[in-house]
Image (spheres, rainbow, N blue to C red):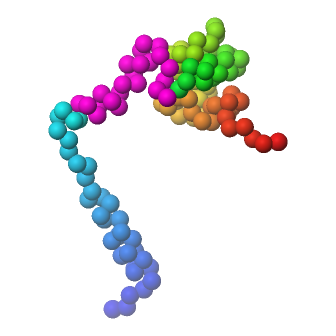
Amino acid sequence: MRINFNNLVSAGLLLIAVPCFGTTRPRHSSTTHATLRNARYSHSTRSAHHESAPGMAPERATEIQSALIKSGYMSGEPTGSWDSQSVAAMQKLQGDNGWQTKITPDSRALIKLGLGPQQPN
């Protein structure tokens, strides 16, 4: 039986890929799992109280809201709080451009609003 190069490469790729499918995540106790779940979803509680998104400074929220108002995706005055109206406006902007809408603000949306990284002239 003669071994050709394609069979050898296929066998090598199979040996590399198989261990990837056999890995599992360690299980946590119910207390640890509840703590992780609460930490993971704590941002939803904050947005319900109309506070800024975790890690977003009120100044940045004001900047983004001003740009959303200027571009017609939001109305009113900037509040500096990343609230449900801000999220909805950003989701609309992102959706209108065919981008994902689950994570806001998306970097492409910020760039479109003129708030991305500054390019040297």
Rendering coords of residue 35 (x, y %)? 26, 31
Q: Is residue 64 magenta?
A: no
Q: Quadrant of the C terminus?
A: top right
Which quarter of the figure has residue 31? top left
| Count of numbered marks | 0
Question: 100 or 45: nearer the eye?
Answer: 45
Question: As drawn, is 10 to the left or to the right of 100?
Answer: left
Rendering coords of residue 82 (x, y %)? 52, 19
Rendering coords of residue 99 (x, y %)? 57, 35
Asked if residue 68 shows in the view, the reply is no
Question: 118 or 67: nearer the eye?
Answer: 118
Task: Report the magenta residues as a range.
Answer: 34-55
- In this view, 47 is above or below 39: above
Q: Quadrant of the N terminus?
A: bottom left
Residue found 60% across the figure and 36% down from its top: 107
Asked if residue 47 shows in the view, the reply is yes
Question: As drawn, is 68 to the left or to the right of 46?
Answer: right
Question: 26 or 52: nearer the eye?
Answer: 52
Q: Residue furthest bottom?
A: 1
- In this view, 6 is above or below 113: below
Residue found 31% across the figure and 65% down from its top: 18
Which quarter of the figure has residue 61? top right
Residue found 32% across the figure and 60% down from its top: 20
Rendering coords of residue 47 (x, y %)? 44, 18
Question: As drawn, is 45 to the left or to the right of 25?
Answer: right
Question: As drawn, is 13 to the left or to the right of 89?
Answer: left
Q: Is residue 36 magenta?
A: yes
